[in-house]
Amino acid sequence: MDRIMVQRREGKKISDEAEWINADDVKHCTREMFAKQQYRIVIHTEDGQFVHCFSNDAFLRLMSERHGMIMTDAGVVGNLAKMKSVDYENGKVYFDLGQDEYITISRPRTNLVREYINKLFGK
């Protein structure tokens, strides 16, 4: 089942939080102007109206709720279920054995990432 990342719309107000809806639940979509020379697609379902997710922060928060995913730094979410190794000292999570592909871990999030990895892998 395909899902679409959206933000709920009530009147002209758009939620700060992102959520998933099933593509099969879409009744119809309309195009509305929201700012000068900018428009958004409004998605209509039985459950209400939504706009396609435009907020980077909402996207990152929603992705971090998925199994294996965690925000490791400002604007950085990683799927730790796919990591190959982690270097807490240098603040990096590696996704390849050559340690060329990595994401950063901010100092304040190091313990949270360490705890998440322990829960994820049972170590």
Image (cartoon, grey):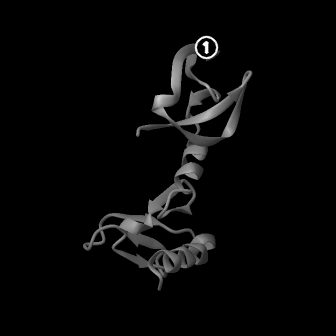
Q: Position of residue 95 (x, y in %)?
A: 33, 67
> Taking 106 as reference, is 10 left or right?
right
Indicate the secondary structure of the residue bearing disc 1.
Answer: strand
Q: Residue 37: in sight, yes or no?
A: no
Residue 54: x percent and y percent?
56, 34
Which of the two residues, 100 or 65, is positioned nearer the viewer here? 65
User: At x 28% / y 69%, what residue is drawn?
Assistant: 96
Q: Residue at x 62, y 35 (%)?
A: 7
- Label 1 belongs to which residue? 33
Relative height, residue 10 to residue 55 (above, below)? above
Name the residue: 47% across, 86% down: 123
Q: Please determine whether, in this image, residue 17 is positioned above or below residue 102.
A: above
Q: Position of residue 103 (x, y in %)?
A: 43, 63
Question: Which quadrant is the N terminus positioned in?
Answer: top left
Q: Nearer the viewer, residue 35 or 12?
A: 12
Residues 113 and 19: in front is: 19
Furthest residue to the bottom? 123
Is residue 119 toward the left or the right of residue 9 in the image? left
Residue 25 showing in the rendered view: yes
Q: Residue at x 43, y 67 (%)?
A: 80
The part of the image, by quadrant, that contains residue 87 is bottom left
Q: Position of residue 28 (x, y in %)?
A: 52, 17
Q: Amino acid at mark 1?
A: Met
